[in-house]
Image (cartoon, rainbow, N blue to C red):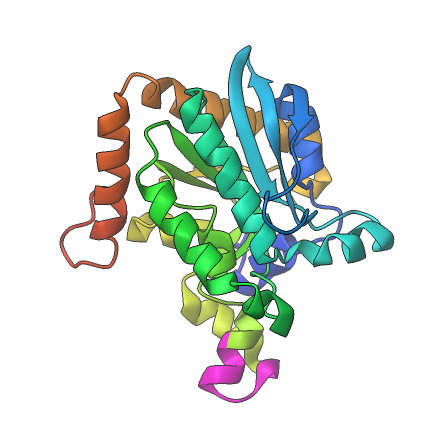
Amino acid sequence: MNPLSAAERVAIARHPQRPNITDYIDGLFTDFFEQKGDRLCREDPAILGGVALFHGRPVTVIGTRKGKTAEESIRCNFGMPSPEGYRKALRLMKQAEKFRRPVITLIDTSGAYPGLEAEARGQGEAIARNLLEMSRLTVPVIAVITGEGNSGGALALGVANRVLMLENAVYAILSPEGFASILWRDASRHEEACGLMKLTAPDLLALGVTDGVIPEPAGGAHCNPVQAIREVDRALEYHLSALLKESGQNLAAGRYKKFRKLGVPGKVEP
């Protein structure tokens, strides 16, 4: 069987029936307690977060929420968070550090909301603040890209000790349509852009941007969500067990070193 093209993987990553954050929370964790609000402005439903148990261990779970129904998708702004969502996420991460809980993030977003109101309320600053604060957390942080992971909107939850991708997920600086619009001024060339962007899980693992690829059922995670979630569970348990053996100082230093090395020739470890 021929391997999937980058454009085909993008289509699978965007499939409307692909498992979303609520499916993963229901399948991976128990006793999930949602926490809302950024304590500054308002609640942003595009970011879902709270405390849960993972194999009996307390963890903090945070992720982007696209919604399943049309009404929920509109309420969640189709998974494009506003600054309040990123500030809520940071509040929960700092709380996790205080109580020594590992942080697990689940990323599936086309990007942060670029609207005028979001920019006026500090979208860029909120994302930058998350990058800074996540880089120095002293608890284990694991990020899992479950679908799309585009732009700073994804990276704001992705500064982790381990960055994992599902087999058909994609991770990039922007959408293929945006890439084609900028490079060729023609969004219709988005399939061509997919091949140039190196946005697939195998590409990014080879480049050292990510740390592992989680296998999916044939046809994609939406074809067998139970199996897909089981594979994510195995990956999380494996990587979390290793990270829990490290000190807080080493976790923060290792995370900082990992991201400083990205893009430096000859510095990326296999």
Residue ID at (27%, 48%): 259
Q: Residue furthest left?
A: 266
Drawn side of residue 141 relative to residue 217, left or right: left
**Quadrant (top left, top right, bottom left, bottom right) of the C terminus:** top left
The main secondary structure of the magenta stretch is helix
x and y, in percent, of residue 254 in the image: 23, 36
Q: Nearer the viewer, residue 28 or 82?
A: 82
Vertical placement of 103 versus 91: above or below?
above
Drawn side of residue 224 relative to residue 259, left or right: right
| Quadrant in the rendering for residue 141 | top left
x and y, in percent, of residue 266 in the image: 13, 54
Residue ID at (44%, 64%): 173
Residue ID at (43%, 46%): 158
Vertical placement of 6 versus 224: above or below?
below
Residue ID at (79%, 47%): 68
Res 202 visible:
no
x and y, in percent, of residue 69 in the image: 84, 49
x and y, in percent, of residue 174 in the image: 49, 67
Vertical placement of 155 versus 146: above or below?
below
Q: Which residues are the magenta region?
A: 179-188
Q: Residue furthest front?
A: 40
| Quadrant in the rendering for residue 118 | bottom right
Q: Nearer the viewer, residue 128 or 219?
A: 128
Queried whether the magenta region covers residue 199, the answer comes back as no
Res 101 visible:
yes
Vertical placement of 191 versus 48: above or below?
below
Q: Nearer the viewer, residue 158 or 81?
A: 81
Number of numbered discs overlaid on the protein picture: 0
Drawn side of residue 61 relative to residue 222, left or right: left
Drawn side of residue 202 relative to residue 113, left or right: left
Q: Which residue lies furthest to the top in this view?
A: 56
